Structures are given as C-alpha cells and as structure tokens.
C-alpha cells in the first residue's frame, strides 16, 4: 500500500463513526456527463478516480539542474468520505532528498504540505513520489493560482536537503477541474479526517 493511503486509512479509522453517519455530498454526474473527463467508479464499494481526458499534468525542475518533477492532478473517491483533489508528484534526480515537506507558493501565500514518500531506484536514477491531498482549506492554493493567473509556482522539496525550483500547472485543465469540483458540491463535506491525515500549514 502506498504510504499516503496508509496514513489516510489510519486517520479514517479514528473518525469513521462520525463521518459514516453523515451523507457525502457529491454530484458525480458533473464529471460523468462531460467528455473532458475519464471517470472510473466502482459501484460495489463507492470508490474511484476522475482524471482529465487529455491529462492535467504538472512539470517542474530544481534549480541548477537538481532533478526534475513530474505529476498530475486528479480526484480520488473513497467510500463514505468526501472526494478529494490531489496532486501526485514524482521527483527524479541523482541524489536523495528524503522529502518530508513539499512547499508551494503560487502567489503571496505559502503552503507547506507534510508528505510521506515512496522511493525507488531504476537505471541509475533515484525516484521519490509524494501525494498532496487538497482539503477544504489547502485547496485555496488552486484558487490562488486562478485568481492571480499564476500557474508557475515556486517549489521547495524539503528533507535531508532542500531542492528549490518551480512547478508548472496546466492552466486550462486545472481551472476546469477546480470549477467542476466546486459545482459537484464536494467542498460542502467535512474534511477533518483529511486535514488530520495530511497536514498543510498555510502562511
């Protein structure tokens, strides 16, 4: 199991009684009836994923050629819990960072995500992957990008060492997904379990 899923499972077990009692508000038809999305939904356990048909990609690089970052933005659906937008990132470089924080600053506000990493070595390259879960609070980062029309974001991968650089988000796809996510009613739910499992400091 990926580490971000393990953290989420632990947090959800602690508060499942409270959240299971509340009905999840989410109009999935906003995405199902839209050719711009690929929807995978399992009716047997109410889980799934929503992706942009042509991809909602993220690309970045560290300064001084200190590695590259690739990723995408999608929506994860979990039974009895709010669907969440998430940013999945993969760092590739020559030296480990052992990242435990990903810091992004799209405009005047800094978002510090605490992350769990998965690591791999392949063909002489090292890889670290992390997932940023956007809660009802940290999703403000996307709104900051849209409001400021700034989709090139300052980035720091912070761990045993620090790698600074930038991330480039897809303006059209990210804006569309954010607006449709709002229209689905997803943010009307209780995100307390996600805020506990995936802390983000906003300053």
Image (cartoon, rainbow, N blue to C red):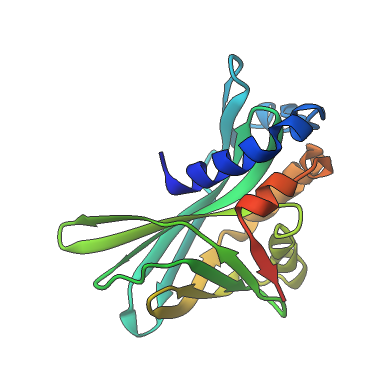
Looking at the rendering, in which quadrant would you find the C terminus? Answer: bottom right
Percent across and percent down for residue 120 are 27, 54
Specify the farthest residue to the bottom: 64
| Residue 39 can be seen in this image | no
In the displayed structure, does residue 1 sit left or right of residue 19? Answer: left
Which residue appears at 76% of the width and 48% of the height? 179
Nearest the eye: 1 or 44: 1
Quadrant of res 34: top right
Quadrant of res 77: top right
Percent across and percent down for residue 23 are 81, 27
| Residue 79 can be seen in this image | yes
Which residue appears at 70% of the width and 60% of the height? 138
Count of number-bearing discs: 0
Percent across and percent down for residue 149 are 70, 70
Specify the farthest residue to the top: 44
Specify the farthest residue to the left: 123
Specify the farthest residue to the front: 14
Which residue appears at 61% of the width and 70% of the height? 112
Looking at the rendering, in which quadrant would you find the N terminus? Answer: top left
Which residue appears at 80% of the width and 27% of the height? 21
Nearest the eye: 196 or 63: 196
Quadrant of res 29: top right
| Looking at the image, residue 181 lies above or below residue 114 | above
Percent across and percent down for residue 170 are 57, 59
């Amino acid at each position: 199991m990926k580490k971000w899923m393990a953290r989420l499972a632990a947090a959800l077990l602690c508060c499942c009684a409270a959240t299971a009692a509340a009905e999840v508000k989410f109009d999935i038809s906003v995405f199902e009836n839209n050719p711009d999305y690929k929807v995978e939904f399992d009716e047997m356990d109410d889980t799934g994923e929503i992706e942009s048909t042509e991809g909602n990609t993220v690309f970045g690089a560290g300064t001084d050629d200190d590695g590259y970052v690739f990723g995408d933005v999608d929506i994860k659906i979990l039974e009895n819990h709010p669907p969440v937008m998430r940013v999945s990132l993969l760092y590739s470089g020559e030296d480990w960072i052992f990242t435990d924080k990903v810091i992004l600053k799209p405009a005047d506000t800094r978002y510090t995500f605490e992350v769990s990493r998965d690591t791999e070595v392949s063909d002489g390259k090292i890889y670290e992957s992390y997932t940023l879960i956007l809660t009802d609070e940290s999703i403000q980062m996307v709104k900051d990008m849209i409001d400021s029309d700034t989709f090139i974001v300052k980035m720091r991968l912070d761990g045993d060492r620090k790698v600074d650089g930038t991330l480039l988000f897809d303006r059209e796809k990210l804006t569309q997904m954010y607006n449709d996510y709002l229209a689905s009613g997803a943010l009307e739910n209780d995100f307390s379990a996600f805020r506990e499992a995936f802390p983000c400091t906003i300053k």
